[in-house]
Amino acid sequence: MTVSAETKSSTLANSSSPVRSKASTRSKASANSIQSKDAGTGEKSAQTAGQSLGKVGEQLSSTYLEQNGFEILERNWRCKAGEADIIAFEDDTLVFIEVKTRSQSNCGLPEDAVTAQKRTRYENIAINYLMHHQLPTSKVRFDVISLLVFSEHKAFLRHHRDAFFSDE
């Protein structure tokens, strides 16, 4: 993956931050999902926990983007090519953003999960979005936001601008 020099990192841990309060609410839901059991089998549902963690990451990312001047157009936009986590405008640039959230880094950093196949899928999503929406002529960019959620009140966010290019 190509990561530009504009990679931006921030730790979300300040108790007065609106990002933190939303993370706290979402993380509690995530913790509840982790502990919930399937009524039929009595087994814990890892998929539910992962989905909840993903929703936490998407909410934190949306808040971060809005605080940094992005206009969120879509969240979880779906088409025949797949789903884009976030589609936003930054100035005159249409940005397709893949959000990767992890609670641990022992399996690699979240951004490492953005494979060549996922990059191709995002390019096809962008084509579908542009075909179905009347937008002024604008540049298109693909970003990745990776989050490591350490606890209910602490996360590490990295914003990778121009994370990949269509000619890779």
Image (cartoon, rainbow, N blue to C red):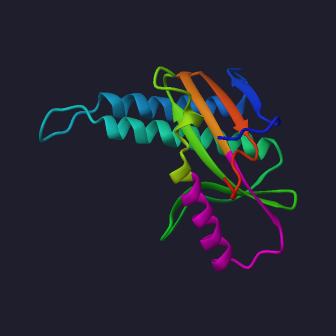
Q: Position of residue 20 (x, y in %)?
A: 65, 28
**Direction right: furthest residue:** 91
At x 74% / y 28%, what residue is drawn?
9
At x 56% / y 35%, what residue is drawn?
112
Q: Position of residue 158 (x, y in %)?
A: 69, 32
Is 121 placed above or below 159 here? Answer: below
- Whether the magenta-drawn stretch holds residue 134 is answered as yes
Is 60 placed above or below 141 here? Answer: above
At x 32% / y 34%, what residue is drawn?
46
Specify whether 76 is left or right of 137: left
Q: Position of residue 39 (x, y in %)?
A: 16, 39
Residue 126 quadrant:
bottom right
Q: Which of the two residues, 168 or 45, is positioned nearer the viewer here?
A: 168
Is residue 98 visible in the rendered image? The answer is yes
Is residue 76 visible in the rendered image? The answer is no
Is 54 placed above or below 151 here? Answer: below
At x 75% / y 47%, what residue is drawn?
162
Q: Which residues are magenta?
A: 119-143
**Direction left: furthest residue:** 40
- Whether the magenta-drawn stretch holds residue 60 is answered as no
Residue 1 quadrant:
top right
